[in-house]
Amino acid sequence: MRKTAVRPTIFLSPFFIAFLLLLIFSPISHAETLADVKREIVDYQSQPLERIKTLKAEVRKIQGLEEGLARQYSIPVSQVINYEMMLENNIHVYHSIYVLQKQGTAPSQFILEEGRLEELAEKTPPYSFLLYLDFLEDVENYLNEADRYKRLIDKAKAAILRNNGERDEAEKRFRLVNDLLSRVSGNNLNNSWRMREIMAKLEECTAINTLYTTTLSLAEKELKDTEGKIAIIKPMLDNIRKNIKFSSEDFVFLNKIVLDKTTSLYDTISMLEKKIDPANEFSDDATEMTQFTRFWISNEKQLVRDEILMILEVIEKLTSLRSVWRGMQDLLEGNLDMSRQKFILARTNDYIDDINANITLCVDAIQTIRETEQAVRRRFSGESPLITEGDALNRDKFLDNLAVRKKRYLSYLVDLGMIRSQYMDLRKESLRITGTQGNDDKMNFFWGSNFSRIKETELWHVGEYPVTVGKFSFGLMIFLLGIVITRYFAYAFRKRTSDGLSMSRHSSLIIQKFIYYTGVIISTFFGLWSLHIPLTAFAFLGGAVAIAVGFGAQKYTGDIFSGMILLFQKKVRIGDEVIIADKRGIVEEITLQNTVVRCEQSNHLIIPNSKVLEGAIVNLTLNNSFTRAEVKISVAYDTDIEQAMSIMREILSKDKNVLKSPPYKILFEDFGESALDLTAQFFVDIKENLERDVKSSVRHKILTAFNNAKIEIPFPQRDVHIKNGTKEPEEK
């Protein structure tokens, strides 16, 4: 009875699951046209929350049935999971659309401070320095907002353009699969699933387009509002600049702010120094310490040291603000000449770079604190065997210390950001005032008295000997002048040898190389001498070169020595016709490292000199530069062979590129299958001409002469005789 009751359940379960899958994920009823689908998807954009509910319901249907769906539709399981991820992504996009739509209907929160406008309206010139600083900060904030909206607009436009391409591709796939579904008889499950994925992709592209279009519209509106505020407040700032009055009370107030902040920071340092006092909390000499107390001591002390150094950096930067405010006063009052303005600008840039570096260190410190928190929670949790009951309280205290320290670092970030903002305001004011100066003053600003300071700037040093910009420039001029003179002498020598000096091209090359490398060495030494650095300071280079040769440059050095051997042995010379590595060509160049051979079709074979000496070389022009060339041609059997050979002799005799000694020959080579084979053998001076060029010219002249003489150059022929299939009677 028990078996009879259970068996139907077991039998029916697979069929029930298959029926459920078919019921839920039956082949989708594809739309007749793409336009219908697009209209349906567009309707979703106006009701994002409702569409989110529908997509979540579809995701819930899929979850847990991935393997069954994969078997049903004959697709990989990963494909089902990717479809599920596409739906999840569409849900996220619709959430973003909903948030942006709500933002678009809400009133704008970016309103120019009415209080500031009223304050300015109530005041009459002259204006205070504090008001000037506030307005300067407002303008800067508005300009930063405008830049942010511009970047957002550019990003949205690029995203829309990229998304349109993906949508077009999805529409192409839709039309293809839709056509397959309409033509294939029966239940095409695989194509049905493909259509489901394409529909999800089309919806994703449409939703993303809606998202970025809405973003673009809102960003353009915000940019317009922001630029309107800038247009209102900038003239106010210009009016303040023109009617500002500097008062000692303003600077007393600002200095007090700096003093209060620095006093608070020094108090923090005192508190931190107590933490690393051996008499407090834990001692390194404690005889009994748990794993956590060791962890606490090592990390806490390092964190304290790092924080103290960071606070000292913040104090230094805060103190420098006094010079910022006084510098702005001098700029606005016109008390600084161009040289002093440049000095302030250069110093300001240095300070900004230094502050940026401190901000980076501060961010890194916050990240270190977070990593320490994670390590404590991971290693010393309540279930960890490394921590005792007594350590639990210390652990919580340590975590509280980390949380407080993180807040302090955030305050350091705020202070550094404020200081950087002040310096950037000073830089912009310096550039603004500098931009109003005359052209003559600008030239003096850039060159004037600052040239000498640039000239004395140290680039590096060799021992105790500094290499300044001036020294380096002069040394470089000496070196380049030496190279120019060397090239001139090498050119003059080459010109002299080419004009009639009895010297081979190969020997000329050797001397040219010697002149060039000698000139380079001499120019280098003179350049170093001009730096006023004793050459003994470079004595260590000899050892370095020797080590480099011994360990890393054996092959390169071997090529150089092989090149020197090739140049002086003269067994392979410039202009020789050689066969190297089964390649035939003309030697064009022999350098200290490589031999360059020009092969046929103007291809160049570059061979390391060591390989040239190691391998077999066939030098066709070792004794002279002559090479034998052959031109083969065929004429018809009914041709007057003596006439044809006479024409070829005449052509060779008149061709100035064909050597007359050794003499040329015209040979009756063979009886071909369909023609008489003739061969013209002659010699060419490869120093003067390329063999292939001369052969080409001879062939062209022979063809023209043969055509004029009505001499036929046949093509291969074959006579085919077809015999009658019937048997002929034999003669009796």
Image: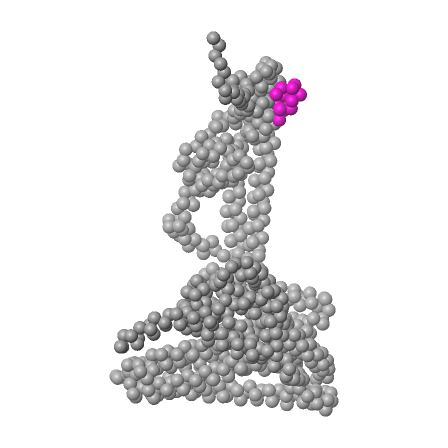
Q: Is residue 154 left or right of residue 180?
A: right
Q: Give the magenta-colored segment's residue range.
A: 700-712
**Picture coordinates of residue 107 (x, y %)?**
65, 84
Front residue (pair 714, 494): 714
Front residue (pair 270, 185): 185
Front residue (pair 701, 499): 701
What residue do we see at 28% from left, 83% from top? 289
Picture quadrant of residue 145: bottom right
Front residue (pair 476, 92): 92
Where 210 sits versus 577, above or below? below
Q: Is residue 391 visible?
A: yes
**Picture coordinates of residue 589 (x, y %)?**
51, 38
Residue 706 magenta: yes
- Looking at this view, name the residue that lies furthest to the top: 732
What residue do we see at 48% from left, 12% from top? 730
Residue 145 magenta: no
Q: Is residue 38 left or right of residue 382?
A: right
**Picture coordinates of residue 394 (x, y %)?**
34, 87
Q: Is residue 143 visible?
A: no
Where 157 sits versus 270, above or below? above
What colouring method underlies this structural image? one colour
Query: Looking at the rendering, in which quadrant would you find the N terminus?
Result: bottom left
What residue do we see at 34% from left, 70% from top? 11
What residue do we see at 49% from left, 74% from top? 58
Query: Which secondary structure class fits the magenta region best?
Result: helix
Picture quadrant of residue 133: bottom right
**Picture coordinates of residue 705 (x, y %)?**
64, 21
